Amino acid sequence: MQLTSNSIVRSVAKITVFTIAMLWSTLTVLASGGESHDEEEGFKPGEMIMHHISDGHQIHIIGRIYIPLPVILIHEGHVDIFSSSNFWDGFDSHGELKFKPYTASSGTTYENHHEIIHVVGGHDHGHGEIVNASKPVAYASIDSASVIAAPMDSLMVMSAPVVEEAHVEHIKPLDFSITKNVAGMFIALLLMVIIFRSIANAYKRRPGQAPTGLQNAIEPFILFIKDEVAVPSIGKKKAHKYVPFLLTVFFFIWISNLLGLIPFIGGFNVTGTLSITVVLAAFVFIITTVSGNKHYWGHILWPPGVPLPIKFILVPIEFVSIFQKPIVLMVRLTANITAGHIIILAFVSLVLLFGQSSAVAGYGVGVGAVLFMVFMFFIELLVAFLQAYVFTLLAALYFGDANVEHHHDDEHH
Amino acid sequence: MEFLTVLLDTLMNQGLAGIGAGLAAIGAGIGVGRIGGTALESMARQPEATGDLRANMIVAAALVEGVALFAVIVCLLVAL
């Protein structure tokens, strides 16, 4: 190997990068050596992650900026509508929002307990949920990784019998509030209406001409779903009946997934909640069941081309799979999106955990964590599109199964 | 005694949940690895089919990951 100037420059560059990397990692490890174990003020990653994934009655933008959302409750026949800022009660030592009970104009007192609204004054709540709210938090800190590092005596304190406030029966009103997830769905809905209305108008205004602008950008996706997903799965004749639903569900899931990836607008997690994906899967289930023709049910209850003893094993399996397919759709979407959010939040909490012990450690870990986080964001972009595509593809396949034609029986198994 | 109870409780809940999540990761790794491996092999045999193979590989990987993420969700529910 010749000693050219190019190779020297490259070797020097490699040595420099290696040295910097070693110095940085050493500094980080040394700086984190002086950890102080005060569990009261500690940062709890588990809580922070759950707070960001779960629903809430306000949108947390950054720091102490919250956007209140309307709370709509129906209790004993009357409707209470008020802003969720009525529950706010300043901030605690962590900078987290504190809640207080609120008496609506109808006279009912509500309290916001971990984002579930209860009616106060119903059953015996003599344990005093507000006062004991710190107890569950102390208990919950066992969940975080800090328990391993905690000194013995604080563990003894935490293991003292905790007042079980979970056994008190809380009356819950019917909660029709506009929560963060509902607001996220409205945003996705608004985006879809705006985009597709403008595209439809463009087609009307300029018939037969080449598409331009937004129309040009979205048309490939519409044609992709129609020609590569719907028609091959359902067949040319019946595909047009299902294409509107497939397009809607594809774009809704894609836009909601992307919405969850935008930082600093409140951290939406629309498609990552089971309650929303269960509705999408239920739609698929209902459409499949309603549009199932004779051959569909025939294939399930009396599979052709299968020897008789195996039929008895196969029929229960096929029957269960009617319900299992939508359930799998639901869990797959939720799990993928939520897992992605948790990974990104875990990198953030890594920085915050190390930064707790010393600022230098925080910055040191921050370099690597931010790089990994950016990488994860790119993967999440891919996953956003991919999960929407997989949901739509499987829905189209199930619709195609439900509309199976007669001549398929001849070439079965 | 209290410490042991708390330790065992943590072990059973969060400890097993951690192990479960790790096993799910193994499953996902093996599954997606096999998909990628056979896809690459087929692309080497027939380079002109690369586009087709790539699209189907990604779809199959998404489906396999879905199953692994079931286990992750269950472990999450156990742990939190």
Image (cartoon, coloured by chain):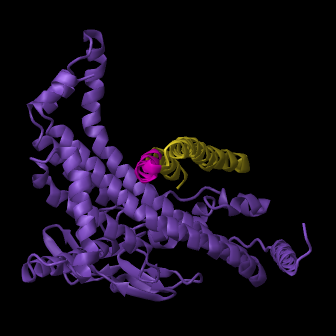
> Is residue A302 part of the magenta span, yes or no?
no
Depth check, front residue: B78 or B45: B45
Depth check, front residue: A193 or A404: A404
Give the overall secondary structure of the magenta segment.
helix
- Specify whether residue A177 is in view: no
- Decide: is A285 above or below A205: above
Depth check, front residue: A242 or A63: A242
The image position of residue A12, as x and y in percent, is 87, 78
The image position of residue A339, as x and y in percent, is 49, 59
Task: Please indicate whether residue A359 sits to the left or right of residue A84 in the image.
Answer: right
* Chain part drawn in magenta: B48-64
Q: Colour of chain A?
A: purple
- What residue is drawn where x is 58% and y is 43%? B20
The image position of residue A353, as x and y in percent, is 68, 73
Count of all numbered marks drawn on residues in the image: 0
- Judging by colour alone, the chain drawn in yellow in this rendered image is B
Task: Please indicate whether residue A257 sits to the left or right of residue A177 in the image.
Answer: right
> Is residue B62 part of the magenta span, yes or no?
yes
The image position of residue A254, as x and y in percent, is 33, 66
Depth check, front residue: A163 or B22: B22
- Decide: is A361 above or below B30: below
- What residue is drawn where x is 25% and y is 83%? A213
- What residue is drawn where x is 51% and y is 70%? A377
